Image: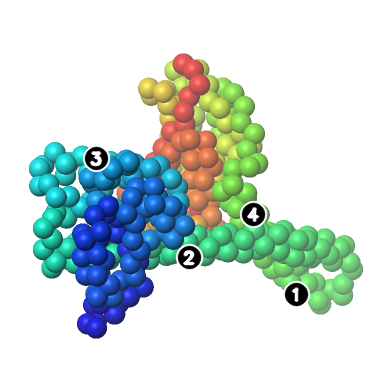
Amino acid sequence: MSDQAETQTRASILVVDDNHANLRLLADLLLTHGYAVHEAMSGPAALEIARTLQPDLILLDIAMPIMDGYQVCQALKADPRTCDIPIIFISALTETEDIVRGFEVGGVDYITRPFRFREVLARVASQITLVRQRREIEALRRQDRQTFESLSRMKDEFIRMATHDLRNPLNVILGYTTVLEHIAVAEEHRPLMDEARQAIRSNVEKMRRLVTDMLELAQMETGEHLRPVAVSLGDFLAEAVGSFHRLAEQREIALTYIPPAQDLVVLVDPDAMTRVMDNLLVNALNYTRPGGRVTVRARGWDGWALIVVADTGIGVPPEDLPHLFDAFYRVNRGHASDVDGSGLGLSIVKTIVERHGGHVRVHSKVGVGSVFRISLPRLSA
Ligand code: ADP
């Protein structure tokens, strides 16, 4: 047996022909080339065998009494147990019409009598290869799905762990830091005590922010916690920007809000959308030097409401731009590396905006500034 035949040993083929001599001819040819062969001499018998044995391939005669090949093919395609089995039609006729009809009812190829054996074997082998490749792809997909599901379970576990095992101890440490602030210590130990307290507090705050951001991102990815309501975008932004005026003043940055010309109504979860604006405004203020400007504008555009947050800050290098919305991605160069952050802010922004059916885009130029544009589906003009 040749190598090729050996690899085909397990492939099973159902040959359907009402003519016994023809059936034998094909069956013997396939048997001698290492295929497992099942035989049927009528349409109903073929359907029965195909349903129970589910062969890898069917060679199906067109001209048969009771049920012709087309009818058998249609019945096979209509049954979920057999619909994926490829069918090669056998015909004594070479008329294009028969061949075309065969393809129309779901056949994948055809062979004609009198048989040219090498051609029959080549057509059979190519269909068997396709069947195997399809199965391999399906197996890989199943494996991918399983890996994805197990990763997703691990993520859920991690979130549960982060909530209880990280957040709670951090709160305890913070509580005791406050206690330490009120304990009298000898004058000579005071500077060290102050330094220790400050270091604990700022590091715990940093960890708490990171844990909170991670939890928020994980929650937003499922979208389960969103409670969208109709919101007037103009009023919402006035409030969101308003809460940053003091910080902007402290940083000596001019913060301006230009409301939309006409009222825009959007369907959003106000808390989640506040997180979006907070993250964008904190970034704009963090990455803009004193004397700079941050401007927030909104306007309607077709069925969309557009929010623009522009700054005259340090900008983002072009090679970092494509990764900016990735979780944990931070630009670790120049002034950007002086700012503390988790690298999660923009991925939270993107996740929330996309959960609302919108998009976020960024344009930025180093030394000139950055513009973040959010588009959200709008409810009415
Ligand atoms: P974080 O600010 O916590 O590092 P983000 O996901 O919010 O994380 O931002 C990712 C990175 O994108 C930041 O580290 C910063 O380098 C860059 N970035 C974000 N906003 C701006 C901005 N307005 N101007 C310049 N760089 C920015």
Most foreground residue, 36 or 285: 36
| Residue at figure coordinates x 11%, y 42% from the top left | 96
In this image, 166 relative to 278: left or right? right
**Disc 1 target residue:** 192
Of marks 4 and 2, the one in the foreground: 2
Mark 4 or mark 3, earlier in chain:
3
**Disc 4 target residue:** 215
* Among the 4 quarters of the image, the one containing residue 196: bottom right
Colour convention of the picture: rainbow
The circle on residue 76 is none
Mark 4 or mark 2, earlier in chain:
2
Q: Dot 2, how many residues are within 10 Å of its Cα: few (below 14), some (14-19), or many (20+)?
A: few
Q: Amino acid at mark 2?
A: Gln
Mark 1 or mark 2, earlier in chain:
2
**Disc 3 target residue:** 104
Do residues under tags 4 and 2 come within 8 Å of each other at their CB atoms?
no
Q: Is mark 3 within 8 Å of ligand 1?
A: no
In this image, 267 relative to 108: left or right? right
Of marks 2 and 3, the one in the foreground: 3
Mark 4 or mark 1, earlier in chain:
1
Q: Is residue 197 above or below residue 188?
A: above
| Residue at figure coordinates x 56%, y 63% from the top left | 151
From the top left corner, tell me how far across and down residue 340 is, in percent.
Answer: 55, 60
**Disc 2 target residue:** 143
* Among the 4 quarters of the image, the one containing residue 101: top left
| Helix, strand or loop at mark 3 | helix
Q: Amino acid at mark 1?
A: Leu
Q: Is mark 2 within 8 Å of ligand 1?
A: no
Q: Amino acid at mark 3?
A: Glu
